[in-house]
Image: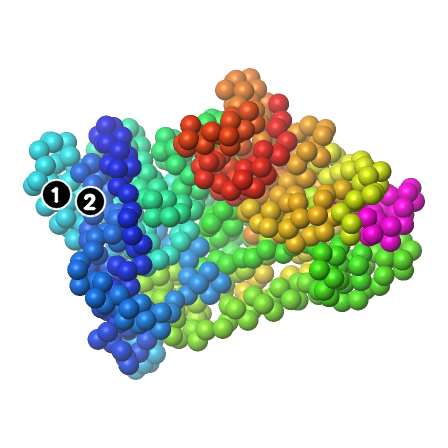
Amino acid sequence: MPESFELLKNEIEKIKSVKSDKLTRNFYMYSGYGPFLGAPVTLARANAAKELFERHYKHVYENDLIAGSLFGLFRYEPEMSEYEAVAEETVKSFGSNKFWTGADHFAPDYAEFLRLGVGGMINKINNAREKFNGDEKKTIFLESAGIAMRAFGNMVRQYGEASAKLSERITDKTSKSNLNTIAKNCGRLRNEPPRTFREALQLVWLAHTAFLYEGRHAMAFGRMDQFLYPFYINDKNNGTLGDGQVLDLLKSVFIKIGERAMLGSDDVVNICVGGVKRDGSCAVNELSYLILDAVRQCEIPGPNLSARISDSTPDKFLDACLVSIGTGLGYPALMNDAVNIPALLRRGYSPEDCRDYCMVGCIENFIAGRQPPWSDGRFNTPKYIELAMNNGRCMLTGSAEGPATGAAESFGSIAEFDDAVGEQMRYGAARYMSFFLNESDRYNRERYEQPFLSCFCGDCVERGTDINSGGAFYPSAHGVACMGVGTFSDSMAAIEKLVFTDKICSLAELRDAMKKNFDGYGELRAACLKAPKYGNNDDRADKYAVGFVERTERLFAKYRTADGGPVYTAMAANIQNIDAGKLLAASPDGRNAREPLSDAASPTYGMDANGPTAVVNSVTKPDYTLVSCGTVLNQKYSAEMFANEEKRAKLLALIKVYFEKGGQEIQINAVGKKILREAALRPEQYRGLIVRVSGFSARFTELSPEVQQDILNRTEHE
């Protein structure tokens, strides 16, 4: 079996997509919609999913250990092109949910699905139909859920049949045996719940594949080391499966996440390992290590691995995480249970559910199968300092973007100016939430029900209600990524020191310098750059980071999502700090106009001059239990820090102190600047180079020059 992974990897790399998958998906969905035009929309959607699941070509690799592939979307039939226009028109007419309307970025309840299996889920749906007999709306929803789930069962069976047919055509004994095992397993899984680790992994992967066929993105696996562990330990105790075989099975699944890249983009499939169990005891187990090794050995950006670290996490596990990070992958991101669990408890979730959290997308905290799909957006916080300095007007365009809070000449103290910044932020938060609520509640929810997805979220079936219409146990949550804490804190610290303490210049003079991008104000810019900076354990700057976290939480805590759920804050930016910076004039910290903001919760790159311990001390001063969504702290350490056991032990100790002091998350790049510069100049020689970006990893040579430069600018600690 160990050879199968390399053979499968080679098979995948040989396949290249030649056309968009849109034509195929549209055709199958149109085939399902057609007979149900004029019928209840939910039934039409269920039948569109049925056609998509059952009719797509079941592509199986000769060296597959677990079946399920996206390349069925590239199997064309001649008739498809004849219906291209009408199919596209019909599918467009029905529409679909988007990111802000609850489409994806969801962690299914795979534990419950594995317990029930397809047949058990269908029985659950039928029992609910009997319970709601006479309620037409709920009956239609449940009938639709049953149609979609039975179609998925048929899809599982068909992958088994395709594996059996392929087995008949090949001669390699190992491949034939594996394909026949897939056929047997899929035949069982059509109706029965899994009994073995291999069956459980097969069912999860095919469910994930079905979500991808529907066009969903960032569908998380969640706590894979927990819901697969009972199957793993049972097989291990029975002597039917060894760790080497488990590792190869996991790799055969994770490598196929890379299929999405061949179709145009990597899929951010978040996998969570470690942490604590629902009862609070340590959750790290043998499977946690195997998943960590499998992701590392696949060497692709797609599986976004997150490791939860608690007070009970063994140092051995944290060291294994650092070894993986040190390969250059940047995986896993390290999450602090001591912060994230209290941050979620504040929102009214049960203690057991809070201990059972995972992540979707990049770092967003999520309770699997208990709340609707995730959404978030970006809040360009440093912009409000600019508006406060210019009486509510953008310095780049002159247009009014905020309330008139007074000319720069009118502020007599830092407190008065800070109040003006607060007023600009309040107005900005109101604009943000108005836009989000208008977009998220724009559609008639009954016409956008999702019967298949709802099967993976409690209590949708029990309530006979769609996942976005009150079926989920908890309401939806939305995250506001408050960008640029470093730029914000450094700017406020510079204003306080230069204008109100040392009186080097007036606020009006600083405003004028910013409008001119410091052209002719070289000495003033030098003073701005020398002012206190966040990340150096300097309270003159760090106090503004503390206030940043508290103020943004207060701003958004009063708002609710369309179904009454909480609005979280996040200290994250993905790579939007670059685009956000293009909307800003020069800032008081000495940054030039249109340059990137500081990244996420990280200090401004190059300004954290006092070493990693100073960074830890600065970044842990804010109370991150106020930040329920999550945080991104990007750090860069030399490769030597990971290769040398003594140095790695010191880094491990530093991370433990960071978490003990209240740090929420840390992710580390271990690729040195010399290699990165070489890769930027000679991309053809470094096509396989993977780096941590911000909340995700990616191939360095496929990033835009701006993002590459942003990574190069990060302070590299020794």
- The stretch drawn in magenta includes residue 594: no
Residue drawn at x 26%, y 37% as measured from the top left: 14
Residue 449 appearing in the image: no
Determine which of the numbered discs, if any, sits on residue 166 in the image: 1
Residue drawn at x 76%, y 42% as measured from the top left: 590
Q: Is residue 292 positioned above or below 270 on the image?
A: above
Amino acid residing under circle 1: Leu
Tags 1 and 2 in contact by the CB under 8 Å rule? yes
Question: Residue 103's x, y, as percent?
Answer: 42, 61
Q: Is residue 55 left or right of residue 391?
A: left
- The structure's colour scheme is rainbow
Determine which of the numbered discs, if any, sits on residue 3 in the image: none
Quadrant where the C terminus sits is top right
Question: Residue 127's x, y, as percent?
Answer: 27, 69
- The stretch drawn in magenta includes residue 513: yes
Residue drawn at x 61%, y 66% as measured from the top left: 433
**Nearer to the camera, 8 or 357:** 8
Q: Is residue 221 positioned above or below 370 on the image?
A: above
CA separation in Å, label 1 and label 2: 8 Å
State which quadrant residue 179 falls in.
top left
Q: Main secondary structure of the magenta part?
A: helix
Residue drawn at x 54%, y 60% as measured from the top left: 478
Question: Residue 116's x, y, as percent?
Answer: 27, 55
Q: On the image, numbered disc 2 is attached to which residue?
A: 60
Amino acid residing under circle 2: Val
**Nearer to the camera, 217 or 87:** 87
Report the span colored magenta: 488-514
What residue occupies the far front of the structure in this picture? 520
